[in-house]
Image (spheres, rainbow, N blue to C red):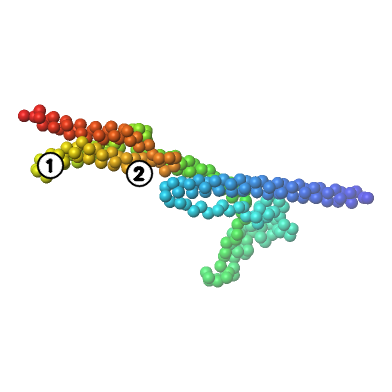
């Protein structure tokens, strides 16, 4: 064997070794892309489930489209996977299709395929955009960033869904006390209207006393109970809302009669 034959054989072995290494690297990259895509798919599925739970909690179910997997064609593309170009394909930057930098102002080169000069806008020779090569790794990274942003918004929505619409920053006891006080205050205002009506002879004294001691406190208690049940419960709260009925009875059945008794005492003290 001559030295030239030995050198040629060594070059062939080196090229085959490099080709094998490129193939192994491409296979590893495809495997990593598949693993990342599967993880992202499970993550998006979990986000969709959580979004559907939040939608049902607020009474507006959300239809989440199924996440799409990475394009298998782009994954198997040797250029996209980091492998060598296909046999017979011109290298980037060379030949008639080597890019705009290699041969500017030449037909068939650049971002558009140029047609014959003077053709109309609707003619077949109008420049048409070429399909851009998609890198799966870049697309997965963008999808991951969007998933991170969706997680942040989902956490904020979850925090909001765990707070009631009525006085969300208050404690349950303080919220219930405020609601019952407001209901009792409304009952007091209505009681003064009844006092005026009784003064002009529309209501009798017995009817007025019954409303002041039982009717108006009961109405205030029921209205506060209903308000706490409607707006005092968080959408994602487990169980019934904290209404504190004993607190409502104390507030409503003491405040309204006490205010009326204070009004009567004030009338007796005045000359």
For image coordinates 62% across by 52% down, the residue present is 70
For image coordinates 10% across by 40% down, the residue present is 199
Q: Is residue 10 shown left or right of residue 207? A: right
Q: Is residue 215 shown left or right of residue 115? A: left
Q: How many circles with numbers are drawn on the protein?
A: 2
Q: Position of residue 175 (x, y in %)?
A: 34, 35
Q: Position of residue 138 (x, y in %)?
A: 60, 48
Q: Quadrant of residue 178?
A: top left
Q: Earlier in the sequence, mark 2 or mark 1?
A: 1
248 versus 131 height, above or below: above
Mark 2 highlights which residue? 230
- Residue furthest to the left: 271
Disc 1, SS? loop
- Residue furthest to the front: 206
Question: How far apart in space, not on screen, are marks 2 and 1 (Cα)?
Answer: 36 Å
146 versus 90 height, above or below: above
Mark 1 highlights which residue? 204
From where the camera sits, is residue 142 visible? no
How crowded pointer 1 is (Cα within 10 Å; few <14, some 14-19, many 20+) is rated as some
For image coordinates 26% across by 35% down, the residue present is 252
Q: Is residue 243 shown left or right of residue 98? A: left
Q: Position of residue 163 (x, y in %)?
A: 40, 39
Closer to us: 133 or 97: 133
- Residue furthest to the right: 1
């Amino acid at each position: 064997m001559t030295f030239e034959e030995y050198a040629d054989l060594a070059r062939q072995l080196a090229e085959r070794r490099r080709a094998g290494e490129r193939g192994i690297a491409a296979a590893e990259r495809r495997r990593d892309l598949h693993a990342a895509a599967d993880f992202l798919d499970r993550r998006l599925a979990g986000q969709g489930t959580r979004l559907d739970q939040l939608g049902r909690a607020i009474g507006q179910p959300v239809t989440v489209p199924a996440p799409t997997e990475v394009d298998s064609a782009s994954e198997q593309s040797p250029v996209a996977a980091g492998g060598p170009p296909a046999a017979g394909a011109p290298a980037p930057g060379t030949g008639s299709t080597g890019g705009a930098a290699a041969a500017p102002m030449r037909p068939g080169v650049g971002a558009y395929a140029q047609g014959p000069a003077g053709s109309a806008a609707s003619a077949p020779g109008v420049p048409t955009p070429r399909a851009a090569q998609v890198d799966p790794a870049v697309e997965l990274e963008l999808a991951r960033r969007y998933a991170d942003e969706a997680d942040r918004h989902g956490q904020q929505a979850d925090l909001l869904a765990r707070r009631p619409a009525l006085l969300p920053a208050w404690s349950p006891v303080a919220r219930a006390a405020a609601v019952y006080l407001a209901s009792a205050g409304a009952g007091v205002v209505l009681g003064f209207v009844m006092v005026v009506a009784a003064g002009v002879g529309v209501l009798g004294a017995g009817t007025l006393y019954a409303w002041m001691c039982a009717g108006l406190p009961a109405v205030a208690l029921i209205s506060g109970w209903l308000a706490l049940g409607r707006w005092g419960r968080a959408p994602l709260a487990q169980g019934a809302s904290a209404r504190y009925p004993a607190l409502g009875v104390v507030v409503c059945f003491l405040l309204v009669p006490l205010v009326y008794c204070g009004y009567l005492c004030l009338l007796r003290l005045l000359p």
